[in-house]
Image (tube, grey):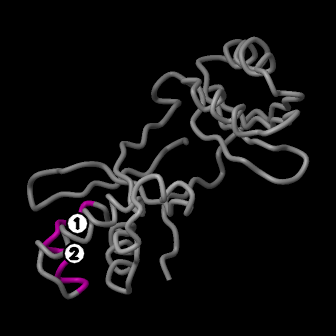
Amino acid sequence: MVAAESLVLNTGSKVLSRLYFRFVPTRERSKITNDPDKTDIDRTDRAILRELQRDGRRSYAALGALVGLSAPAVRQRVQRLTSGGVLRVAGLVDPIALGRPAMAMLGIRTSGDPRPVADAVGALPEVGHVVLTAGSYQLFAEIACASARALLDLVEDRIKPLDGVSACETFPYFAVHTNRFTWDTP
């Protein structure tokens, strides 16, 4: 991720944490909780999510005024959305600022179940995202390295030799055109 938007949740003057928002697939959400009541999202939850995406620095009191709830009620909903896996709290980091300007997307073909390969690739510290896909590649992985040479070494020495990898195509980034951290919450 390049030039990441930073969203901060606070309670007046005290910053609690940086937030980014994504909807968690059902399979992953089931690992977080088995209680369907914790992951149900109503109209008010969606309004809170929309407002946090617009301005993650809003306090619970300010959010409450926008959605018609008290600050404690907003806090409780945000905690429920977080524990239910709908809302994740994390710091977004710009890999270029961390000295990793060589970025690429890898298209990985596997010779069997892609999930063990996804686990192995995802465990590498240079890997930011791994997704399982349909089509000519079973996996896509986004990587960020300190140099073009480090990127080459990662692909040739650590990813291509993994059991189950039958092919790996590298798509180096020239620039990141769109990097969105907000999603429509109908």
Judge the density around disc 1: few (<14), some (14-19), many (≥20) Cα neighbours within 10 Å: some
| Residue under numbered circle 1 | 58
Across and down, in percent, residue 164 comes to 81, 27
Where is 96 relative to 9, above or below? above
Q: Is residue 61 left or right of residue 25?
A: left
Across and down, in percent, residue 95 comes to 51, 32
Disc 2 or 1, which lies upstream in sequence?
1
- The answer to whether marks 2 and 1 mark residues whose Cβ atoms lie closer than 8 Å is yes
Quadrant (top left/top right/bottom left/bottom right) for the N terminus: top right
Q: Is residue 11 left or right of residue 174?
A: left
| Residue under numbered circle 2 | 63
Specify whether residue 116 is painted magenta: no
Residue drawn where x is 65% and y is 26% of the image: 102
Q: Is residue 65 left or right of residue 3?
A: left
Residue drawn where x is 39% and y is 66% of the image: 53
Residue drawn where x is 57% and y is 36% of the image: 128
Judge the density around disc 2: few (<14), some (14-19), many (≥20) Cα neighbours within 10 Å: many
Q: Could you tell me the amino acid type at mark 2?
A: Leu
Where is 91 relative to 61, above or below? above
Q: Residue furthest front?
A: 34
Q: Is residue 109 left or right of residue 116?
A: right
Magenta span of residues? 57-67
Q: Could you tell me the amino acid type at mark 1?
A: Arg
Is the magenta region chiefly helix, strand or loop?
A: helix
Badge 2 marks a residue whose secondary structure is helix
Badge 1 marks a residue whose secondary structure is loop
